[in-house]
């Protein structure tokens, strides 16, 4: 599918899951070289920057939510909600071509926004370099939204953790932290190609010296999102350590309780073993109330020991 948006002095052409004929038609329209055309005919699994005297090409992979039909919306599957989506940019002095091989939500929303503005007030008066900055701003805003979505999930996990569900939180925290690591990896892979792409646009006869300020803002968008992800990853790491401490404290409490219970029953077992010997001269055993006397002794011992341990706050 081909989408065209005319703007001041140029055009934005967005190709969504394009056929080969559509790519070739766009390449002929903007006089793209065969090398650039060949790069657009199929997805590229790694970042790429290329270009010539007429246009600059960049291939980026942006982290995003997985498709709704594939994602399972619970804390145990946070890693399944993060994937990378390829966006190819070809930028010339008076045109921007974006190629994507699946639906990418931020670009789709931007298209709808520009269409609505066009219906309300005619053609959008946006310069090519301004539109390029807007494209990157929407893409990085989507990454920021995904990061905040994971942060909300982490907050729910934290509430459950302090509500006594530490064991369930172990896997959930690990999944969210893994998703943050995927985000960081995708953003880190963009840093050097983005610098080269923006430098090529600044050096070439595309937009002139004022573009340097826009390029700095685009770099800043990526850096800010990366720092946001790092901050939330640090919070997730701290939460995992806190959860481990709570688990250890709970296990220590269980071990202490078992030890105290065992210490209470040990003298009771000793009493029963003594009276089970039934040797000559054994006191009480000949009494008709021997059973109740022994049970009373054992009850008194257990109550005494329980009171001592409760006073020391080892139990209860």
Image (cartoon, rainbow, N blue to C red):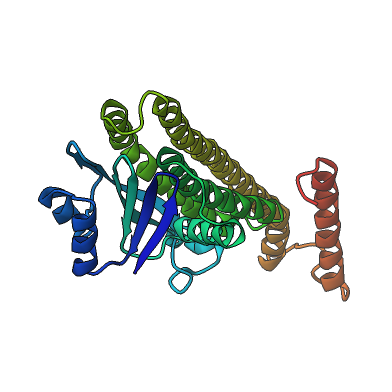
Position of the N terminus by quadrant: bottom left
Q: Nearer the viewer, residue 247 or 91?
A: 91
Q: Position of residue 142 (x, y in %)?
A: 51, 51
Q: Position of residue 254 (x, y in %)?
A: 65, 53
Q: Residue at x 72, y 64 (%)?
A: 275
- The correct choice, above or below, for 240 with respect to 268 in the image is above
**Relative to the observer, which residue lies in front, 266 or 95?**
95
Q: Residue furthest left?
A: 34
Residue at 38% of width from left, 51% of height from top? 11
| Vertical position of residue 203 compared to residue 307: above or below | above
**Left or right side of 41 for 246:** right
Direction from residue 30 to residue 245 in the image, left or right: right
Viewer-closest of 282 and 78: 78
Residue 297, x across and y down, in percent = 84, 60
Left/right placement of residue 52 relative to residue 106 reads left
Query: Is residue 296 toward the left or the right of residue 125 in the image?
Result: right
Q: Quadrant of residue 20?
A: bottom left
* Total residue callouts: 0
Quick one: 123 or 177, which is closer to the camera?
123
Residue 12: where, in percent of width, then height? 38, 53
For the point 53% across and 37% down, the residue is 228
Task: Give the residue displayed 71% in from the left and 64% down from the top.
Answer: 272
């Amino acid at each position: 599918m081909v989408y065209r948006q005319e703007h001041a002095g140029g055009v934005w052409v967005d190709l969504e899951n394009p056929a080969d004929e559509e790519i070739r038609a766009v390449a002929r329209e903007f006089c793209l070289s065969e090398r650039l055309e060949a790069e657009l005919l199929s997805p590229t699994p790694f970042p790429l920057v290329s270009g010539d005297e007429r246009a600059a090409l960049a291939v980026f992979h942006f982290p995003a939510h997985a498709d709704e039909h594939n994602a399972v919306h619970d804390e145990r599957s946070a890693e399944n909600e993060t994937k990378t989506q390829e966006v190819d940019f070809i930028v010339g002095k008076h045109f921007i071509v974006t190629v994507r091989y699946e639906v990418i939500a931020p670009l789709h929303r931007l298209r709808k926004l520009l269409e609505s503005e066009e219906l309300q007030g005619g053609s959008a008066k946006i310069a090519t370099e301004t539109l390029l900055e807007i494209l990157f701003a929407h893409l990085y805003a989507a990454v920021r939204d995904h990061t905040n979505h994971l942060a909300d999930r982490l907050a729910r996990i934290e509430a459950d953790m302090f509500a006594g569900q530490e064991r369930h939180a172990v896997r959930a925290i690990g999944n969210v932290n893994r998703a943050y690591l995927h985000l960081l990896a995708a953003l880190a892979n963009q840093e050097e190609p983005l610098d080269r792409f923006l430098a090529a646009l600044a050096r070439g006869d595309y937009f002139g010296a004022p573009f340097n300020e826009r390029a700095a803002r685009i770099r800043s968008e990526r850096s800010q999102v990366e720092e946001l992800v790092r901050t939330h990853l640090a919070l997730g790491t701290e939460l995992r350590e806190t959860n481990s401490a709570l688990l250890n404290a709970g296990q220590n409490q269980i071990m202490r309780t078992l030890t105290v219970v065992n210490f209470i029953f040990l003298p009771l077992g000793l009493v029963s073993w003594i009276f089970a010997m039934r040797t000559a001269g054994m006191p009480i055993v000949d009494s008709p109330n021997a059973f109740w006397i022994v049970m009373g002794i054992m009850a008194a011992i257990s109550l005494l020991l329980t009171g001592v341990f409760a006073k020391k706050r080892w139990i209860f």
